[in-house]
Image (spheres, coloured by chain):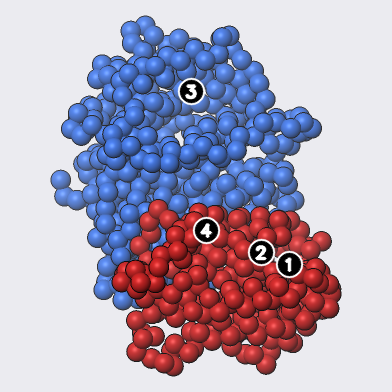
Chain colours: A blue, B red
């Protein structure tokens, strides 16, 4: 049965695959009568590109694996099934004084998905990736074998599965380390800065004292304002929560998919200009709830629909330290020139904490992430131009967000990809993997 | 602290309801067939805040155990305030049409076992003069349709049984809630293509939980099914019999 509801977050490409469910960690994989078709574990469908798709095959929906197993409230160690979402974890642990060690920009991802994509967040410079806080997990393979994987036990499977894009087997449960917090609040500071050079200055100066740093940039600004934006930095608040802080409820949604994208050059220009000027002062300090701080877009449920039925592309590249300033300038210039700006552009410095993952994306340097409406070839041409810059300085493109990078680029960016092949489950495949390992 | 018994506890809707009950601090007794699954769910509920979790494995077709399982639950919980009956199967309608035995079996699982359990539970609650009975029936029980009238007939029987029971128990201060879910995305409906009318079991559980708190009699979940079924029920049989529903 083909299922329109199992697609990727960016809605491109649209594929046909059969969906089956796995609901109990003790169940075997639901592969009866599958005629040898390949399968792929599927979490909550928040991957932008085709790492979560398996055109012509099967996706195994693991959201039913949603039980907590054990919680050590003294040391902040949580063991739970892999279909539990980060939202469910925070709902459970924040009142007990524990927060995720690493969180991406949405809380609607599953633990299994967070491991398989080795996601990172605003604290990469301090804490590295999600995979660096995973003690162990169980890996279920299509031959029925179950492996307990950790840095000590089955270490090579542990490394291949963290950032392994779901290809090594189904993660049934995982044990993760949390970090202590005193409240649900963040002491936040937002600084308006006027060009890329200032960004690097502020970012370098902030990374020591702030656990979380990120910048939103106005990617339509040009000339000596290139790269201008708002730098957002914050720390978990030490003040114990003693007053009600506004916690936005999830009550907005984009109910329908418009036939065309609502993001165009006019709405973009307006949004970017207004957003850049949203605060009157250049520097504003405040105390905010963790939800608007980490997950501003989660407040608009299914915001991906604003891009219409053709979907969009997210582009995220990492650029190495030595060349990041020049290369970032070049990339922003190309985007600005093309006039195909992005509604949400995020810029951040990565730290140098290496992930155990074989295919992990981050590298020491800078990372830029943007969304582009799908205008077909015009958009693809721009992304190819950005690839040129990324490639020329030895950077890489994030597989979890990609739907179009060339197999040549992938194999060049991720030199370990051949090693992965020893660990990939013979029954598992994905649209992404077939695409980036195709002979070029 | 509410004392809650859940029969068919490992079904998707029951699990999500149980999680809400656990967060509210209920003492919970779980009944389902599989020991393994009960254990997984019990650990989860304990962590989420249930004040205690007991479990008993039973196949609902073991009628002779119904009373003793209820008695053990009352003992483990130290009383009983709320019972949720959520077990069920989704019959293969076409297969039922070729097999009176299968039809009978499906009717039994979806109707007679529930009616048997309710008969025992009703007397307990009537004597206690308070409490809440919640049963997951279905919109399918509102009108017979060719695509699943075996299931519909069983759920319809449950719905009417509950109407009568409510009429009997209201004066004893016992609330009887008939839950009528529409399309819910659960393992039971895994083989259906999902469209806009489908809801997640989490959402349905939240709606049921609200209906329990508000002491409602009938809850369509999500709410819009009340109106869909109003239309479906109002089509004259002359016309209805020609539709392919």
Answer yes or no: is residue A126 visible: no
Which corner quadrant holds the N terminus of chain A?
A: bottom left
Which residue lies at the image location 31% right of the left edge and 24% below the top edge? A264
Give how far apart the Cα atoms at labels 2 and 1 are: 7 Å
First in sequence: mark 2 vs mark 1: 1
Q: From the viewer's perspective, is the residue at label 3 or at label 4 nearer?
A: 4
Q: Check the image and report above or below for B202 versus A440.
A: below
Placement of A143 over or under A115, stated as above or below = below
- Residue annotated with mark 1: B175
> Which numbered tag is attached to residue B217?
2
Foreground pick, B100 / B36: B100
Callout 3: helix, strand or loop? strand
CB-based contact (under 8 Å), mark 2 and mark 1: yes
Are discs 3 and 4 located on one and the same chain?
no
Report whether mark 3 lies on the same chain as mark 1.
Answer: no
Real-space Cα distance between discs 3 and 1?
A: 55 Å
Chain for numbered disc 2: B
Disc 3 or disc 1, which is closer to the eye?
Answer: 1
Give the alpha-carbon distance from disc 3 to disc 2, as whole Å.
53 Å
Q: Which residue is mark 4?
A: B226
Nearer the camera: disc 3 or disc 2:
2
Mark 3 in CB contact with mark 4 (< 8 angstroms): no
Pointer 1 local density, CA inside 10 Å: few below 14, some 14–19, many at least 20: many
Q: Chain of mark 3?
A: A
């Amino acid at each position: 049965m083909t299922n329109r509801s199992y697609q990727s977050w960016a809605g491109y490409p649209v594929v046909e695959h059969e969906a089956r469910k796995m609901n109990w960690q003790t169940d075997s994989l639901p592969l009866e009568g599958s005629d040898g078709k390949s399968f792929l574990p599927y979490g909550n469908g928040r991957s932008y590109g085709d790492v979560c798709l398996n055109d012509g095959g099967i996706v195994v929906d693991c959201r039913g694996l949603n039980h907590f197993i054990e919680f050590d409230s003294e040391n902040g160690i949580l063991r739970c099934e892999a279909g539990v979402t980060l939202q469910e974890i925070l709902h459970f642990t924040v009142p007990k004084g524990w927060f995720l060690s690493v969180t991406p920009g949405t809380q609607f991802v599953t633990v299994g998905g967070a491991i398989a994509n080795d996601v990172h967040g605003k604290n990469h410079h301090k804490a590295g990736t999600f995979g660096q806080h995973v003690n162990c997990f169980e890996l279920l393979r299509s031959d029925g074998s179950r492996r307990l994987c950790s840095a000590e036990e089955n270490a090579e499977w542990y490394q291949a599965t963290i950032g392994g894009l779901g290809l090594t087997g189904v993660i049934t449960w995982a044990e993760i380390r949390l970090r202590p917090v005193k409240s649900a609040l963040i002491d936040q500071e937002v600084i308006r800065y006027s060009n890329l050079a200032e960004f690097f200055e502020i970012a370098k100066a902030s990374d020591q004292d702030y656990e979380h740093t990120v910048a939103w940039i106005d990617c339509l600004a040009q000339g000596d304002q290139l790269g201008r934006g708002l730098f957002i930095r914050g720390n978990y608040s030490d003040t114990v929560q003693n007053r009600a802080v506004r916690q936005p409820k999830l009550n907005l949604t984009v109910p329908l998919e418009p036939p065309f994208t609502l993001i165009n050059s006019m709405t973009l220009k307006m949004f970017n200009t207004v957003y850049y000027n949203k605060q009157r002062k250049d520097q504003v300090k405040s105390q905010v709830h963790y939800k608007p701080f980490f997950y501003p877009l989660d407040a608009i449920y299914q915001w991906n629909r604003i891009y219409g039925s053709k979907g969009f592309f997210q582009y995220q590249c990492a650029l190495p330290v030595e060349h990041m300033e020049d290369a970032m300038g070049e990339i922003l210039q190309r985007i600005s020139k093309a006039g195909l700006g992005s509604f949400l552009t995020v810029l951040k410095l990565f730290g140098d904490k290496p992930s155990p993952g074989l295919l992990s994306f981050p590298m020491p340097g800078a990372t830029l992430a943007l969304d582009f409406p799908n205008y077909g070839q015009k958009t693809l041409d721009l992304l190819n131009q950005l690839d040129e810059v990324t490639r020329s300085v030895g950077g890489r493109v994030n597989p979890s967000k990609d739907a179009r990078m060339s197999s040549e680029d992938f194999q060049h960016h991720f030199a370990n990809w051949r090693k992965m092949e020893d660990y990939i489950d013979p029954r598992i495949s994905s649209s992404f993997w077939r695409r980036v390992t195709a002979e070029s | 602290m509410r004392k809650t018994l859940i029969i068919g506890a490992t079904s998707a809707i029951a699990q999500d309801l149980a999680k809400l009950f656990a967060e509210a601090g209920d003492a919970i007794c779980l009944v389902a067939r599989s020991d393994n699954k009960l254990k997984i769910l019990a650990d989860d509920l304990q962590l989420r805040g249930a004040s205690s979790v007991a479990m008993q494995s039973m196949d609902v077709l073991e009628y002779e155990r119904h009373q003793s399982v209820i008695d053990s639950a009352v003992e483990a919980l130290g009383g009983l305030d709320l019972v949720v009956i959520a077990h069920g199967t989704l019959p293969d309608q076409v297969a039922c049409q070729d097999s009176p035995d299968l039809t009978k079996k499906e009717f039994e699982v979806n109707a007679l076992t529930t009616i048997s359990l309710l008969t025992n539970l009703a007397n307990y609650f009537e004597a206690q003069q308070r409490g809440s009975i919640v049963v997951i029936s279905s919109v399918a029980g509102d009108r017979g349709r060719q695509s699943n009238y075996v299931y519909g007939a069983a759920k319809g029987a449950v719905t009417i049984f509950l109407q009568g029971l409510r009429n009997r128990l209201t004066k004893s201060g016992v609330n009887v809630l008939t839950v009528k879910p529409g399309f819910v995305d659960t393992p039971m409906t895994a083989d259906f293509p999902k469209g806009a009318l489908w809801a997640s079991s989490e959402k349905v559980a939240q709606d049921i939980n609200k209906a329990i708190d508000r002491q409602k009699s009938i809850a369509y979940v999500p709410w819009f099914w009340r109106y869909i079924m109003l239309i479906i029920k109002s089509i004259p049989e002359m016309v209805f019999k020609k539709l392919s529903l």
